[in-house]
Amino acid sequence: MNFDIEELLTTALIIDKPMIIVEGSDDIKVYENLVERLNREYDVYAIENINNYTEGCDEVIRAIKDLQQKINENDRNEKYILGIIDADVRLFRNSIPNLKGLLVLKYYSFESHFITRSNLKILIGEITNNGNKTISNEVLDYCESDLEQILKELYYYSLEALKNALIENYNSVIGYSDKPGLLYSGHHWTKIKKKKRNLDYFAKKHSLKYDLKTLKRISKGKWLVFYYSSSILNKLKTLKDACKDNKIPQCQFCKKSKHNKCLRKLNSSYNVDLIQKKLLNYYDNNELKYVNDRLLLLNSVN
């Protein structure tokens, strides 16, 4: 790419095609898919592919800062540029930039928007022979029945990582750079349990309490998706047995004792990685409404 940031904005204006600037390579597909679902045509650029910038949220912020004079020249200019960044820990540092042409997500990471009950229903319908009408609330409740316990563990890991990010020289057990598999294995849990009282005090100081919404604000998205997918997959593997034993409303085959044809059994072999990939392809319009609304403020050739 041989354009600087102002030239890209000028080009977007000339060809009447807005551009979105994102933090890195993983974000391109996410936002291209989101734009396509909105029936819009926007160009999505990773910030590192624009001259004089490298990857990351701070670089997106810097680019949008560099464009402020250009944006302020004409109200029309703001309709052709949007930088999007994760919230990370800015919410807790009171460091949300107030810039025209910048959207800061409400969660620590974009991935957390994919953890919804609506998306779980789509997942069950895709990896079993259940139709949506037979995926009742009882089935969803069964699949989510172990979530609170497992996500409560992630909540304390996330508090520890947040405390480490906010307090200089804090002697932390883990940080946001740790891999989700390491946390899930329980490698650090003994040390975290010893810190629970102090972490509860830290949470109270920041007006935090355990629930999924809070977890989306303080947990790294990749952690949350991994934990959620692991728990859900474990329950999905037992769904056919739950149907057979009438722990959930039985499918029509189990009602006839034809358990080998159970509609709730998995239609293939799945691992956590596959479940994560599937979840990250489901876009819940209710959860993403504020992002969609902001994207729709941009001009479009459509």
Image (cartoon, rainbow, N blue to C red):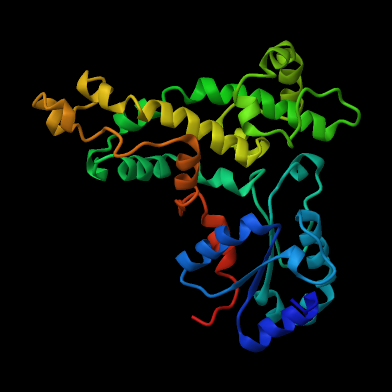
Q: Quadrant of the N terminus?
A: bottom right
Question: Residue farthest to the front?
Answer: 269
Residue at position x 53%, y 82% in the image: 301
Between 191 and 89, which is closer to the camera in this rendering?
191
Residue 225 is situated, as x and y percent measured from the top left of the image, at 55, 38
Against 100, residue 186 (above or below) is above
Residue 134 is situated, as x and y percent measured from the top left of the image, at 23, 38
Question: Residue farthest to the right?
Answer: 169
Question: Residue farthest to the bottom?
Answer: 14
Taking the image as shown, residue 298 lies to the left or right of residue 195, namely left
User: Looking at the image, can residue 154 be seen?
Assistant: no
Between 267 and 11, which is closer to the camera in this rendering?
267
Q: Quadrant of residue 72?
A: bottom right
Against 201, residue 50 (above or below) is below
Q: Quadrant of residue 269?
A: top left
Taking the image as shown, residue 232 lies to the left or right of residue 96, namely left
User: Looking at the image, can residue 113 be seen?
Assistant: yes
Taking the image as shown, residue 43 lies to the left or right of residue 166, namely left
Residue 244 is situated, as x and y percent measured from the top left of the image, at 20, 22
Residue 245 is situated, as x and y percent measured from the top left of the image, at 22, 18
Residue at position x 80%, y 59% in the image: 59
